[in-house]
Image (cartoon, grey):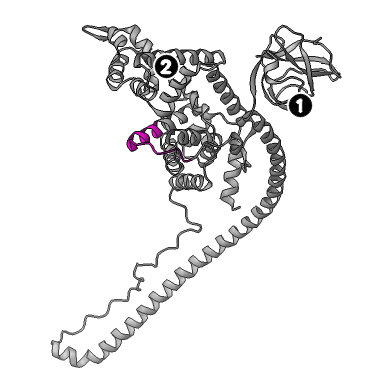
Amino acid sequence: MDRDQRATMAQVREFQDSADDVLLRRIAEQDVAAYEEFYRRYAAQAYGVIVRIVHERAVADELLQEVFWQVWRSAAQYRGGNGAAWLMQIARNRSLDQLRRRQARPALQDAPDRVVEELAGRDETTPDALFELAARRAHVKSALAQIPPEQRVCIELAYFEGLTHQQIATQTGVAAGTIKSRLRLGLEKLEHLLRGQGYP
Amino acid sequence: MSDDLQANLNSSEGWTYDAVVGALPAYVLGALEPDEMLAVDAFLAQHPELQTRAAQLTETYAELALAADPITPPAAVEAQIMARAQAAAQTAPAPAFPPRPAASTTPPRILNRPPAQTPRRLSWGQRLRRFGPMALAGAGLAAVLLLLIINRLQLQSQAASLAAELQDAQASLAAAQESLAALRVQTEELQQLNAELRGRLGEFEGQMANFAAADRVVALTGTDDAPDARAFFALRGDQATLIAADLPAIAADQTFQLWLIPDGNAPVPSGLLSAQGGGVATWTTTVPLRADQFNLVGISVEPSGGSPAPTGPIVLLGG
């Protein structure tokens, strides 16, 4: 480990308890250590979102690089609030853009790995940050589990596949009016459940 | 555009306020048709409060990303991402040593000579015959002297520069030796920290595996006796994993006790949880009921050794 690496690692340790807002402010100032910590916190989740949307690891690799490059360049435009949500929005938008460009969707190549893989071999992961993310993940999964399956499917197709009402109707063979109603009810319930757990 | 949304159209102005409010969740997810998206866009531009609502929904629904299972990106991708940032962050690197001064281009100063007596004016032919050989020899000598002087000045300049570089290098070497000693100490500390983190990570990994493959996950929230406490309970077979944060402080002769509460039946004691309160604590324990045999999960404060039925305050509850 050379001096630069050691200094970076020391800074990374310094950042491990920092809020996302602090990290993103430092990233806007071109602070690589803050960038590394932000990557450690959320890269696996962002990569999971990208793989879920584009279904292809090679494409996901490129997209993850694009997403984090956008974080590096656009951190100054982040207006505070929820850094993870901001990142996931970038990841989703980029992935859906890529999906629409390709038009024809390839067959599923890689099934998403288990959550355990996130932890394997990562020495620097901070348990507190991981706990926070795992707790939020459990909240979301718990909320989705409480939504009727026919509504949940609509939400997932809209969020992860970027489909419109009409496209969901075509894909599922259900009337567009019904799909619209299911999506609205499902999203309202999801919002209610997440709010009940303290989300904005 | 769908029929019911169409029905909400105002004949002259486009969408009604209520129709846009109702369509906002789908708009935020991009699930409206393109013409509907444009119509809502135009409506929002005139209603800042709806923009605020849309931003709020965007943030809430961004949590849906967490429904995707996390996947560790390849190390090569991480390396490329970091290398790109490093390269971008790198400003023009300062030289390790002061730049070597360029070889002097100032011509050497030549001492003024005393003014010679004005010679008698001679013709060019006379001048050539009389002074030609001498002038040639003198000019040659002057040129040689000039070259020697220039060469000497250049060497002096280079020597001074090298001496400065040597001095800097010696200072850098001393600093590097000091840093090396400090680095060794720090490396040992890091190794110890690494071993400790690996141990904690292994433990945590097992618990997360239970969460990932759980038959049932229950979020527990703090009761009035411990409003800040929160926890997650995951059950896989008869193995329960519990992650709790900000539990209240308890006395040395007390313990936390886990209860599984079947619908309409008495709470079933399901294990003792040793903790001192505060921070994040985790446990894995074997419980007597399966995922479909209880309705609620609770944690109470009990005397050391536990109780057959809850006697102390219930601090966490969920179902």
Q: What numbered label is drawn on residue B228? A: none
Q: Which of B12 and B106 is in front in this view?
A: B12
User: Which residue is label 2 attached to?
Assistant: A183
Query: Mark 2 belongs to which subunit?
Result: A
Identify the secondary structure beneath mark 2.
Answer: helix
- Judged left or right of residue A4, residue B252 is right
- Examine the structure image and report whether residue A17 is included in the region drawn in magenta: no
Give the quarter of the image for residue A17. Answer: top right
Range of residues picked out in magenta: A93-109
Tell me if I can see residue B130 in this picture.
yes
Does B158 appear above or below B218? below
- Judged left or right of residue B312, residue B240 is left
Identify the secondary structure beneath mark 1.
Answer: strand
User: Which residue is label 1 attached to?
Assistant: B285
What's under tag 2, amino acid-wise?
Leu
Give residue B186's position: percent from left, percent from top: 68, 47
Residue at image location 40% in from the left, 12% down from the top = A181
- Judged left or right of residue B90, residue A122 is right
Give residue A85's position: percent from left, percent from top: 48, 26
Tell me if I can see residue A38 in this picture.
no
